[in-house]
């Protein structure tokens, strides 16, 4: 499998951190030199490893924001 290249364009925030120091973060990431996408995933301390995550386009992020706003 080819190496995956990524660049964290903008660090937006930390959603949580577990007892081992892994943090669930929301960032804007450019994957394999493509347009940046919003990304939610777990990162090991110092970002030496990453867990599985999900990526969202700007349009999907706007829709997610609208859905979250509707939650009481």
Image: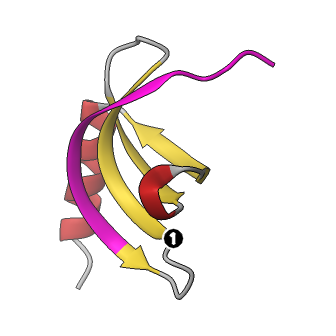
Residue 18 appears left or right of 37: right
11 up-or-down from 8: above or below: below
Residue 46: percent from the left, percent from the top?
A: 44, 57
State which quarter of the image contains the N terminus.
top right
Q: Residue at x 45, y 26 (%)?
A: 6
Residue 40: percent from the left, percent from the top?
A: 43, 53
Is residue 61 visible in the rendered image? The answer is: yes
Does the magenta segment cover residue 32? no
Taking depth in this image into account, of 17 and 40 the one nearest to the observer is 17
Q: Residue at x 52, y 21 (%)?
A: 5
Q: Residue at x 52, y 60 (%)?
A: 42
Q: Residue at x 33, y 16 (%)?
A: 35
Start-end of magenta stretch: 1-15
Does the magenta segment cover residue 7? yes
Residue 68 appears left or right of 24: left
Residue 4: percent from the left, percent from the top?
A: 60, 23
Q: Dividing the picture into quarters, in which one does residue 10 lie?
A: top left
Is residue 62 visible in the rendered image? The answer is: no
Taking depth in this image into account, of 24 and 59 the one nearest to the observer is 24
How many marks are shown on the rendered structure? 1
Local secondary structure at mark 1: loop
Please name the predominant secondary structure of the magenta segment in the image. strand
State which quarter of the image contains the C terminus.
bottom left
Q: Residues within 10 Å of mark 1 (few under 14, many from 20)?
A: some
Residue 51 appears left or right of 71: right
Taking depth in this image into account, of 3 and 25 the one nearest to the observer is 3
> According to the image, label 1 marks what residue?
22
Q: Dividing the picture into quarters, in which one does residue 25 lie?
A: bottom left
Residue 11: percent from the left, percent from the top?
A: 23, 48
58 up-or-down from 68: above or below: above
């Amino acid at each position: 499998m080819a190496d995956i290249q990524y660049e964290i364009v903008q660090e937006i925030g930390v959603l949580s951190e577990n007892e081992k120091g892994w943090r669930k973060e929301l960032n804007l990431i450019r994957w394999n030199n493509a347009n940046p996408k919003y990304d939610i995933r777990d990162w090991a301390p110092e970002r030496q490893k990453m867990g599985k995550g999900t990526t969202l386009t700007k349009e999907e992020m706007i829709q997610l924001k609208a859905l979250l706003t509707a939650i009481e």
